[in-house]
Image (spheres, rainbow, N blue to C red):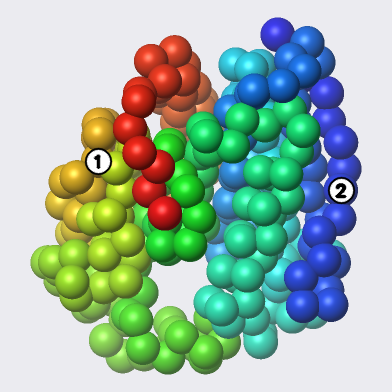
Amino acid sequence: MRVREETISITVDGERIEGTFVLPRDVESDAPGVLCVHGWGGCQEQYLGVARAIAALGCVALTFDLRGHAETSRLHDTVTREHSMRDVLAAYDRLASHPQVDKSLMGLVGASYGAYLGALLIYMRPLQLLALRAPALYKDDNWGEPKRKLHVDPDFAAYRQLTLRAEDNRALGACAQFLGDALVVESGRDEIIPHPAVANYIAALANAHSLTYRMIEDADHGLSETRWETAYNDLLVNWLTEMIKERPCVEPSS
């Protein structure tokens, strides 16, 4: 299916963040909406290839730059998780308001920090499809601190090695409420997100309508080799194809 792209700006807290709609040329309405959220230090450009593949399935995809990245990189040292969450909410609402989007079938694809934010979105907006790659995990406290300062915590790395229950962490608690279809992808040689953190997400998604877990053997956190990126893109597209085709009749998580 042929796709087209539309560059947009989204205003959040008086700042403008850049985004790109990637949508099928031949679909007029009732297309699933899929929001793509990049990780910390990334940008929307990293998801444009994935967004094009998603749009080719008949979906409307939206990529965007979180504040503190790309055109707003001057904010990198002061951006908090609250700022990022507002960015995700604003982008979701922009996607859901698109005239071609079927609001009853909304999905999110996130990597690392973007996956963490995507999990938290479950509390605030309806989601039926959730794809988390190498999902990051953070303590609930110090929510208003600049994101970069969280890594200075001496217990930061150790926290991600803990076995946590859904009630121990807000992101995991959100996943426990998710009733749609979920995909979790782990890198076999991830130097940033250890297996226990990923395992916590998998356990928390116990109430999902379906849960698919895959590991990309030998891959690093950023999928720095083309073969790893290709493997992930193929996994994601195949999973989305199956999920959209089935269109499960479950209540949306909100």
In this rendering, would 195 be left or right of 219? left
Q: Residue at x 15, y 51 (%)?
A: 203
- Quadrant in which the C terminus is drawn: bottom left
In the displayed structure, 93 sits above or below 50; it is below
Q: Residue at x 64, y 81 (%)?
A: 79
* Residue 135 badge: none
Question: Image quarter for residue 196?
Answer: bottom left
Q: Residue at x 38, y 48 (%)?
A: 253
The local secondary structure at tag 2 comes to strand
Q: Between residue 102 and residue 232, name the one nearer to us.
A: 102
In the displayed structure, 87 sits above or below 154; it is above
Residue 214 picture location, percent across and down: 28, 33
Is the residue marked by circle 2 packed among few (<14), some (14-19), or many (20+) residues within 10 Å?
some
Question: Image quarter for residue 16?
Answer: bottom right
In the displayed structure, 194 sits above or below 229; it is below
In this rendering, would 96 be left or right of 205? right
Identify the amino acid type marked 2.
Ile
Residue 218 picture location, percent across and down: 31, 38
* Residue 8 badge: 2
Residue 238 in sight in this render: no
Residue 57 in sight in this render: yes
Pointer 1: what residue?
208
Identify the amino acid type marked 1.
Ala
